[in-house]
Image (spheres, rainbow, N blue to C red):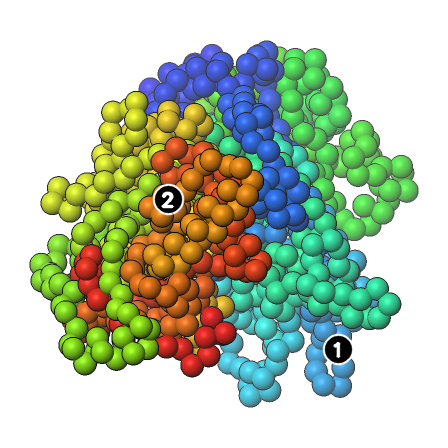
Amino acid sequence: MRDMENLSLGDLCSFEAFSAFWQHYGYGGDQQELIDREFKRVKGITYLDHAGTTLFPESHIKAFHEDIARNVYGNPHSHNPSSRLTHDTVESVRYRILEHFNTTPDEYSVIFTSGCTAALKLVADSFPWKSASTDGPGSLFCYLTDNHTSVVGIRGATALQGVTVVPVQHPEVEAKARIKKSTNEEQGSSTPNLFCYPAQSNFSGRKYPLRYVKGIQSQQLFPACEHAGRWFVLLDAACFVGCSPLDLTKHPADFVPISFYKMFGFPTGLGALLIRNETAEILRKSYFGGGTAAAYLVDEKYFVPRPNVVSRFEDGTIAFLDIISLHHGFETLKKLTGSMLNIQLHTFGLARYTYNVLSCLRHSNGKPVAQILSDNEFQNIVEQGAILNFILLDCHGRTVGYSLVDKMASLFNIHVRTGCFCNTGACQHYLAISNQDVKTNLQAGHVCGDNIDVVEGRPTGSIRVSFGYMSSFEDCQNFLRFIVNCFVDKPFTLDQERLGRLMTSAPVDITASSQSFHPTPITNGQAGHENDQVTVHSVSEVPSEEDVSKEREKNGSTHTITNLFIYPVKSCASFEVGEWPLGPQGLLYDRLWMVVNENGVCLSQKREPKLCLVQPVICLASNTLQLKVSGLEPVAIPLEPSVKNSGLRTSHSKVCGDSVQTVDCGEEVSAWLSEFLGKPCRLMRQSPDDMHEIKNCRRKAGDSNLTALSLVNEAQFLLINRASVSILQQHIDKRQDSENKDTCLDVERLVQRFRANLVISGQKPFVEESWSHLTIGASQLQVMGRCGRCQMIGVDQKSAARTQEPLRSLSECRSGKVTFGVYLTYQPARNSTAVPVLSVGSHVIPQISESADNL
């Protein structure tokens, strides 16, 4: 940068000077173009209150409007299709929130609230505070004095419970830290204590060390190191997450309240409490609202809450449309900025530059124009956020009231925030206001939020400017020129020595300390098969005569596999094969992909019958999955994308109530599917790291084996019997004849509708429901239970047309029990490198269950 000697304000306020000073401005494009495209409404406005609320981009609102105009979202407490769509979409948003904070549903739960304050109140009301007694000390509620009012207000909930309140000054946390040597009595103490601190002060923008989380939990830091019990940490992240990445894997706070309008600008009145799952078990709740009860009685004190922590704490119907809008907030934020790291660098650069200039401004007599309320010089991005708090001084060193500054700023259409910002502790600290001063000011008529800005010559509050991801250097220019034109005695000067030092000094660890978390690279290869040379052995050997004879005696006939289907893409067409290898999750590549909508919700034929027209074709030789449909050129993707592909995007989705981890398959196939279905959608592949397992209710008693699943709903395989299909087909014909219908469903069309993996021959219908196991060659498969049929069998797999058949006839011929086919699982042999193969024509030898009614 050029020599700082005699640098003028005009020089300072040039973009050339700024860009030479800061290399991380913008997001790889024209920042002004982004503003003109997404924030046209702020033209002529200098908006500098992003810590109050940031601004929403137009594309966020447009995408949300198109979403709710295209889809019907019902109350999620119902079970109709529109309600299930809402439920699944909301669950997808929960996963997206956790992904944003680099954690998973296994570690955290997301409870939606009306805002950060409501999230804090939830903790206050449900934390298991313990009163002091002869058995031991009571709970401690501890908090940094630099905390928002809503955090300090938790002490109101503890007042009548014998809880000791301990306000903590920040220097004490580490100054009084010590290696705790617990006595036997202390080790046995389970008294719950809570420590609260902000990740970033909403007053000054100071960032407090995230390592405090583990330090308090492990009782190495004050006050935890001096008090026995179990320590929990509430990390107030509301101000922090608007411009900084938060990694909850590294810093696993027990409670994390947030407000989404501070991140996206829309919607307002929606927040969340992120709770560690291992912490959730301690919470206690007295009130119960709609949707939180598993059962209760109106004339007896009997109430059983739902077992899931989210269902227990979300009283009534959540703001589901607002929640759905969050998906578009995350998507838009990523498209416009790339990452939270980019936002952090962009906004910190603007705040640092503004600090440098404002702190160096001098009146004509050399006195400072501003007193910056900060503990640092904006040199470290880990210690300081994009907030600048200050008071203005006239040329005699007297305070310029914040109310006057606010009124003048409004005349220039500059939007700032003034007062104490609901943080009395920080206001007292930085403005040297004693407790007695607060009481005296109140007696003088000053209350929080009013315009009494100076009492007896001393300020009662300050001025805060804060930056957001859409802020520009022009905002800095406008603000600084406003200060000079309205509040500086001319001719002004600059503290050249200080300015030179601040402008030329390198930020502390700007590269290392700013590193955001990056998801662990996902290996897209099949588990255990990547780059391995495996030997394939067919398991369709003809069974012995003795086995066949025994099977004939039990069932009256032999069974063989007549058809073998895999369904590479969930809910799309089948791919029929003559033989196919088995893997840890069943048939190799069966239901390994799925189509999701713009909110990440899995699409099925129940919602999108046209999916059955998409024909997947797997070619093992070329390692590709090809998708075909009439009227479009086929599209192909690799079966095993290279793990070096840094463009892979991971996310969590939900399949039949279960969380699954998935990998995005890219833009080309997304555009192809979107064109065919006429709505935005993407193709997702199950991650090899996903631990999707069979539901507990499907496991046999005493079976402790974990059965890995692909994206199937219930089990690895579905088997149907042609004899059973024939009985159903005859029932359909008879009923249609009686109703003078001439539409006929033949056996083959019915077989396709049931979307089974294994179709077997046999003379006895429904005999498969009495089996407990079956053997195909050298492989044994376990029967997990009957398949409860859903309305998907009402979709014709050739035309995608919906019909009442065969679900109506199936219900009639089974006396109301709408079941058909059985679920199977397969456990691969241990310590074997051979890959078994199922083949059409293989003999199926069943074993009869001793208690078939249990299926």
Instruction: Tell me how far mark 1 sits from mark 2, CA to CA.
Output: 76 Å
Place of residue 611 in the rendered image (x, y in percent of width and height, measured from the top left): 39, 36
Looking at numbered disc 1 in the image, what kind of residue is underneath it?
Ala
Q: Number of numbered discs present? A: 2
Residue drawn at 55 percent across, 88 percent down: 184
In the depicted view, which residue is nearer to us: 529 or 209? Answer: 529
Quick check: 580 above or below 569? below
**Residue topped by disc 1:** 132
Q: Amino acid at mark 2?
A: Asp
Left or right: 51, with 427 as reference point: left
- State the mark number for residue 746: 2
Question: Which residue, as the protein is rendered here, is positioned at the far bottom?
Answer: 184
* Whether residue 403 is visible: yes
Residue in the image at 59% along x and 73% along y: 230
**Nearer-the-camera pick, 277 or 39:** 277
The N terminus, quarter of image = top left
Task: From the image, state whether disc 1 or disc 2 is nearer to you.
Answer: 2
Q: Nearer the viewer, residue 400 or 30?
A: 30
Measured from the top left, where is residue 506 in percent x and y? 36, 36
Examine the rendered structure and indicate whether residue 625 appears above or below residue 161. Answer: above
Q: Position of residue 170 (x, y in %)?
A: 59, 55
Residue 4 seen in this snapshot: no
Q: Quadrant of residue 28?
A: top left
Q: Nearer the viewer, residue 461 or 572?
A: 572
